[in-house]
Amino acid sequence: MKKSDKELLLKIQKYCLDIQQLIGDIDVDAFKKQASYEKQYACSFCLFQIGELANKLSPDFKLASSGFNWKGAYGLRNIIGHDYDGISVSSVWRACQSATKNLLPYIAGLLCGDSKTL
């Protein structure tokens, strides 16, 4: 793994951990409430950053680590960045769940050099 890809993964991991801290154990209904409005924005920012960083990963790395949809993360970044009002709170919630339950452990495996993840 290139040093630049590792640095990007560490940043992505940080944003996943930020999402995990923001949403804790609240469910989608609690996330949708007005009281969680700030969390929705903060999580959207983290998802935006994850997509931006995913786009900067080297093509070779993305090809070798096909266990995550890096292109989809960048697509979500584009939706958040260009049509924020068009994305549903439920979609943000699902993306947050994916970041914490799928992407976070996947990155941990990549950073530990687990060959099963590549």
Image (tube, grey):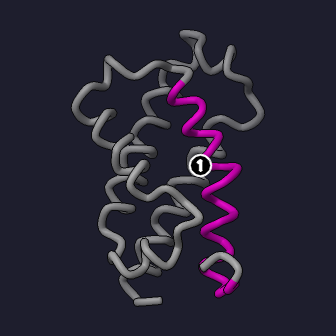
On screen, 96 above or below 10? above
Vertical relation: 95 (above or below) 55: above
Query: Which quadrant of the view contains residue 11?
Result: bottom left
Q: Quadrant of residue 90?
A: top right
Q: Residue furthest top?
A: 34
Residue furthest out toward the left = 82
Residue type, label 1 = Ala
Residue depicted at 65% across the width and 49% down the height: 100
Label 1: element kind: helix
Q: Is residue 89 above or below residue 45?
A: above
Horizontal side of 24 relative to 72 (left or right) equals right
Q: Over which residues does the magenta segment extend?
A: 91-115
Q: Residue furthest right?
A: 25
- The total of numbered circles placed on residues is 1
Q: Nearer the viewer, residue 64 or 9?
A: 64
> Of helix, strand and loop, which mostly describes the magenta segment?
helix
Q: Residue 77 at x, y = what percent?
A: 34, 43
Crowdedness of circle 1 by 10 Å Cα count: few (<14), some, many (20+)? many
Find disc 1 in the rendering and name its residue.
99
Tell me where residue 51 appears, x and y as whole percent: 38, 52
Q: Residue drawn at (51%, 20%), measured in percent from left and top?
A: 89
**Residue 63 figure quarter:** bottom left
